[in-house]
Amino acid sequence: MFQGSDRPDVFDPKRWGLPTEAVVDLADRLGGVWSRFQDCFKTKTRDTSEYALVYLRGLLTMETKRHFTNIARRVIDPDDDGQNVQQFMSDSPWSGQEVFDQIQVEICQRSQLQGGMLTVDESGDKCAGKQKAGAARQYLGRLGKVDLGQVGVGLGYYKDSVWALVDAELYLPEIWFDDDHAKLRKRWHIPQDRVFMTKPELGLHKIRRAKANGLPFEVVGCDSVYGRDGQFRADLDAEELIYMVDIPEDSQVYLEKPVVGVPETPPGKKGRPFSQFQVLNEVKPVEVRGLVTHPDTVLQPVDVRHTERGLLSYECAARRVWTITEKRQVREEWLFIRQEPDDTFSFSLSNASAKTPLSQLALWRSQRYFAERIFQDAKSEAGWDELVARKYRAWIHHTALDALALWFIAETKLDWAQAYPRDPELIQQLEVEVLPALSMANVREMLRAVLPLKQLSPEQATRLVVKHLVNRSRSTSSRLRAQRRNRDPT
C-alpha cells in the first residue's frame, strides 16, 4: 500500500493546479499580455508592435544568446537577418516607461497584491568598451569591484511569493554629462532633458513615480548603497513612506539624542565667530557593529516564515537610535540587527513607529531577499544581462520587455492559483508546511512546449554560416579599402 509521498497520485498535475488546458492556454496568455500592452510599442507614425511579441517570446523561450539577430531567426524565420527587430529595439522611439507604468497599473488592479514591498536595487554588468551608453569605470556589485561597465537602477515589487520589476533606469555617471560625451549622448539617443542624478536620487525619483501611480506598497526596502544616504532616508520619511534599509557595519549612530547647532561665540573671543554645525551636548557617535556586544542589545530568535527549506528563523535585536542627515536633521530611527547563518551580522535602519514589534521589522528585512530574486530571474531566466547593443533606447527597451516577461510569469501564477487551486491535502501527504511555488523556470519550460522555437535544417544552417562568412569578408574588404585611401590620399 502506498503511503504519503510514495502514493502515485502526488504526481497528478491537476492536484498541483496544472491541468492540461492551463498549459495549452499559455501561448494565448502570452498573446493576451502583449495585446494589452500593444499601444506602448506604437509610435506616432508607425505600428511595429508585432516585434514586441517576437522579442518577448524570444526572451521567454530561448536559453541563451538572446540578441536581436538570434531572436529573429529562432522566432520568426531562420533566414531573418534581425534588422527589423534591431530597428524596433535600438532606434524606434516607443516608450519603455509606458510599459513600466502599465505594469504598475495592472498591479494596482490585483487585490492579492495590495500592501507589498517596494525594493530599490541596482545591477551592474561589465562592458568590453566605453562605447555603450552609461559605460564608465564604476563599482559593479555583481563583480564586487570597480570595473568598466553599465549599471541599472531597478524598482521591484513583492507580495506573497509574487515579484515583478516595475521600473528601471540606466544610471549615467557624471562624466557622461561633460562636453566630451555630448556627441555620444546624441548618438546613443540619451534624452536631452536627462540630467545627472546619483543612484539614491534616481531611486527616489522612481519611488515617487510609483507612489504617484498609486502602487499599493506599504514599505520600501533597499541595500546599503541607498540606505547609508541619510538624506535619502529623510526624503522617504518626508513622503510618509516606511522604509527598512540596509547600512554598512561602520555606519555611525547616536544612543542619545544629539543637539546640533552652531556654538555661541564666547564673549571676548578673538578671531572669527563659530560657523560650523556641531553636536553641542557632547554625545558621541558609535559604529553599529560595536552595538552587537553592547549590554543593552538583546538578541532574540524570531520566526519569519515557512520556506521550502523549513522554518526561516533569525536571532534579531532592535533598538532606538538617532542619526544626523547631510542637512543637519536629527532623526530617531530603529536600528535592526540580524545574525546571519554564517555568524556575521547585518544592520538596517527603519523609520517605522516606535511601537513596531520586532517580528514585523524582521519580516520586512527578510523580504529584501526577493529584490535579489527579481534581478536573478530577470538575468538568468529572461536574459537581462545578454544585451549587446550600445544605445540607451536599446537598454531601456530591452529592460522594459524583460519586466513584461516577469509580469507575464507573475500574473500567470496569480491567475492559476485562483482558477486551479492546489489540492490542500498535498501538504499533509508530503509532510511539509508549505508547497513549493511555481518558479519562472517552471513556467518557461511549459511555455516552450506550446511555443517551440524554429529549428534549423542542415541546409538552412549551412546557408547562415555562408552568409556570416560573406559578411565578414565584406567587412574586411571595407577596412582594406579604407586603409588604402589613408596610405594614398591622392
Image (spheres, grey):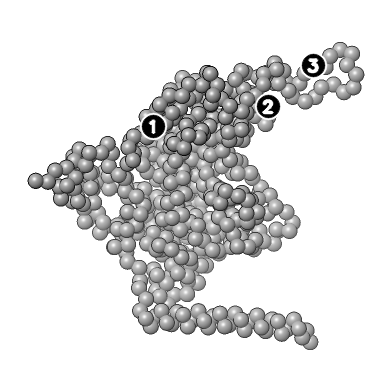
Quadrant assignment, res 202: top right
| Residue occupying image coordinates x 60% and y 56% | 149
How crowded pointer 3 is (Cα within 10 Å; few <14, some 14-19, many 20+) is rated as: few
Q: Position of residue 161 (x, y in %)?
A: 36, 42
Helix, strand or loop at mark 3: loop
Residue 207 makes an appearance in the image? no
Using the image as rendered, state which of residue 139 and residue 171 is in the foreground: 139
Q: Which mark is residue 264?
A: 3
Q: Residue at x 54, y 24 (%)?
A: 293
Judge from the rendering whether residue 436 lies leftward or rightward of residue 365; answer left or right: left
Establish if 448 lies above or below 298. Answer: below
Looking at the picture, tell me which residue is in the foreground, 406 or 360.
Answer: 360
Q: CA distance from mark 1 to mark 3?
A: 51 Å
* Residue on which disc 1 sits: 313
Q: Residue at x 27, y 36 (%)?
A: 433
Type of the residue with mark 3: Glu
Q: Quadrant of residue 75?
A: bottom left
**Residue at image mark 2:** 328
Element on which disc 1 rests: strand
Would you say the residues marked 1 and 2 are in contact, meaning their CB atoms lie under 8 Å apart? no
Q: Is residue 64 left or right of residue 208?
A: left
Position of the C terminus, as image quadrant, is: bottom right
What amino acid does circle 1 point to? Ser
